[in-house]
Amino acid sequence: MGGTAAAPSKAVVVGLDGVPYTLLRRFCDEGVMPFVRDILREGTVAPMDTALPEISSTAWTSFMTGLNPGKHGVYGFMALEPKTYKLQFTNFNSVRVATIWDLLSRQGQRSVVLNIPTTYPARDLLGVLVSGFVAIELKRATYPASLVPYLEEVGYKLDVDTTTFKHSTDAFVDELWDALAKREEVLFRLLTTEEWRLYIGVITETDRLHHYLWAAIEDEAHPYHSFFKDYYRKVDQFIGRVWEKVGRDALFMIMSDHGFCGIRKEIYLNRWLQEQGYLDFVENPPKSHQDISEKTRAFNMDPARIHVHRKGIYSRGGVGEGDCRGLIDEIAQGLLELSIDGDKPIERVFRGEELYTGYYVKQAPDLVLLPRRGFDLKGTITQQTIAGRSSLTGMHTHDDAVLFVNRPVAKREKAHIVDLAPTLLSHLGVALPPELDGVSLLEGP
């Protein structure tokens, strides 16, 4: 007698932008997230490292490709045009390699991909894609176009309007609630109405909450402390709904793109470079990177990417290849010795070749800085001091991202965000491309 064919395997990823492992565990222990607490008992949960620099565009691109930035080409939200020195947003057109869902599409398998940063403008796939931050226009953020009327009817928001914070914290809180409600409505609707083998739904509102109101969770007397926890209660309820709907047969993953912590000081690296004589402008104070002069030997790109002003690469560059190594070493040592009020803000300085390999490695920064907790590195070019503060109270961390899989995972020292693509692909029966930097967490070492 013939048996019933087994249903094809599926995979579900709930992405929580900027949610630290330590905060998730704390909220589970405190009863703020009871649904997630119960889900975590069904598999393996652990902290995870992310890409460097620890910025969402780089991290999410590493997630969706399984590649390091030297292979996928996205080192941050901004890139500098070498001839005009104009800043350009990186977007999905900057990602010239296959994503997880591209590989599935080639095999005739459908995916639903919702709200991943750096997927704008939306491009064709077998399935559905709604772009995440930085997405500008709903029509260009949506594939297929037939989905646009529904999103418009719902009042779907591509992102939180953070400018409301400048006017009123209450208005910002209302914006956070509204954006989350509409995000969850669309995420759940497409989970339940579309056909898919792979479903990825990302909540970015947690990242916005952390940047502006992290101080609220560190201080029980803060006027928005209760709101912060209530927000996570709503996120917890949504994850519980998704879990109950998809069942335990699917591979179920909860992950974040980086961790988070409170800010003590912001560090303005371009100001340090200027004061040390590495960075010069055609006019002071400068208005933008376009004011970089031919005397400049190095400059910083947000958040912590230092580039040598090379001759032959930049139109005003004057540093020859023979002088690069000594200059890089000199800047690295100076940054490690930098002291702010008796504290050293830089934990480690990486050379680009330590971190990156691949076709796009020539675009890599010469130095990437890893800050100590509480020191938020910035690439602004207009600050007149090395250290200061802004309205932001929370910053990204390279470690302490969260990873949960409802399966036993291979015993390794620590998972990295590039491991998630091969984990999903191997579960879905897709042969792993040899160029992947990550390894499947479902297989032995």
Image: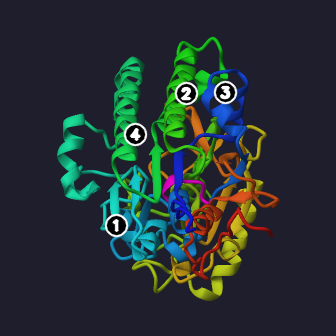
Secondary structure beneath label 3: helix
Question: Residue 243: x and y, percent?
Answer: 54, 39
Of callouts 4 and 3, the N-terminal one:
3
User: Label 1: which residue?
Assistant: 126
- The front one of 172 and 421 is 421
Which residue is at the front of the view, 439 or 385?
439
Magenta segment, which residues? 51-57
The residue that disc 3 covers is 27
Q: Are marks 2 and 3 in contact (CB under 8 Å)?
A: yes
Badge 2, how many Cα within 10 Å: few under 14, some, many 20+? Answer: some
- Pointer 4: what residue? 188
Under circle 2, the secondary element is helix
**First of labels 3, 1 by sequence position:** 3
Distance of label 3 from label 1 (alpha carbons): 37 Å
Residue type beneath disc 3: Phe
Q: Hey, which quadrant is residue 152 in on the image?
A: top left
Give how far apart the Cα atoms at labels 4 and 1 are. 19 Å
Q: Position of residue 358 (x, y in %)?
A: 58, 81
Tell me the amino acid under the disc marked 4: Phe
Residue at 39%, 63% in the rendered image: 110
Q: Name the image quarter holding the N terminus.
A: bottom right
How packed is label 4: few (under 14 Cα within 10 Å), some, or many (20 or more)?
Answer: some
Q: Nearer the viewer, mark 4 or mark 3?
A: 4
Residue wearing tag 2: 232
Q: Is tag 2's residue or tag 3's residue first in the polypeptide sequence?
A: 3
What's the residue at 61%, 72% (across, down)?
Answer: 366
| Inter-mark Cα distance, 4 to 3 | 23 Å
Residue 221 appears left or right of 128: right
